[in-house]
Amino acid sequence: QVQLVESGGGLVQAGGSLRLSCATSTSVFNSMIMGWHRQAPGKQRELVADIDSGGRPNYADSVKGRFTISRDNAKNTVYLQMNSLKPEDTAVYYCAARHTFKSIWVYWGQGTQVSVSS
């Protein structure tokens, strides 16, 4: 069964840090592009960061220099280290996977809530 399971969300004060984890159920994800998306209330879901199978990351401008995406293929896990958090980072964060050269994110986790207080 193909699954993505996020963990690590919570409530933190502005300026604080959190690390999200996305555990995948199968090593097939190791060859896929993995991404972290977020959706704030009343807003569209947006891509925050992604990372290809070789470990090359891409970031949204809003999180560059503050967030770091990484993957540990031996553990079938993807991480999102979030530093210098701001209230506007408050959202439900989703882990997702897509095939290389495909634009559609085909697998999604259930999401984890991140709340940043001012």
Image (cartoon, rainbow, N blue to C red):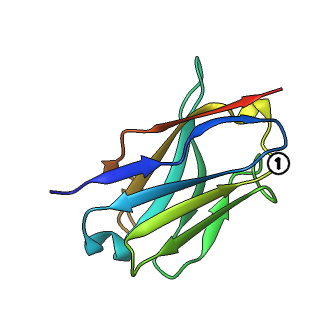
The kind of residue tagged 1 is Ser
Q: Residue at x 41, y 52 (%)?
A: 96
Return the residue nearer the eye: 96 or 26.
26
Q: Is residue 105 visible?
A: no
Return the residue nearer the eye: 47 or 71.
71
Q: Residues within 10 Å of mark 1 (few under 14, many from 20)?
A: some
Q: Residue at x 46, y 48 (%)?
A: 7
Q: Position of residue 29 (x, y in %)?
A: 33, 69
Q: Is residue 50 above or below residue 36?
A: below
Q: Is residue 18 above or below residue 111?
A: below
Count of numbered marks: 1
Instruction: Please give left or right for residue 104 compared with residue 20 in the image.
Output: left
Q: Is residue 76 visible?
A: yes
Q: Position of residue 32 (x, y in %)?
A: 38, 70
| Residue tagged 1 | 84
Q: Position of residue 79 (x, y in %)?
A: 54, 62
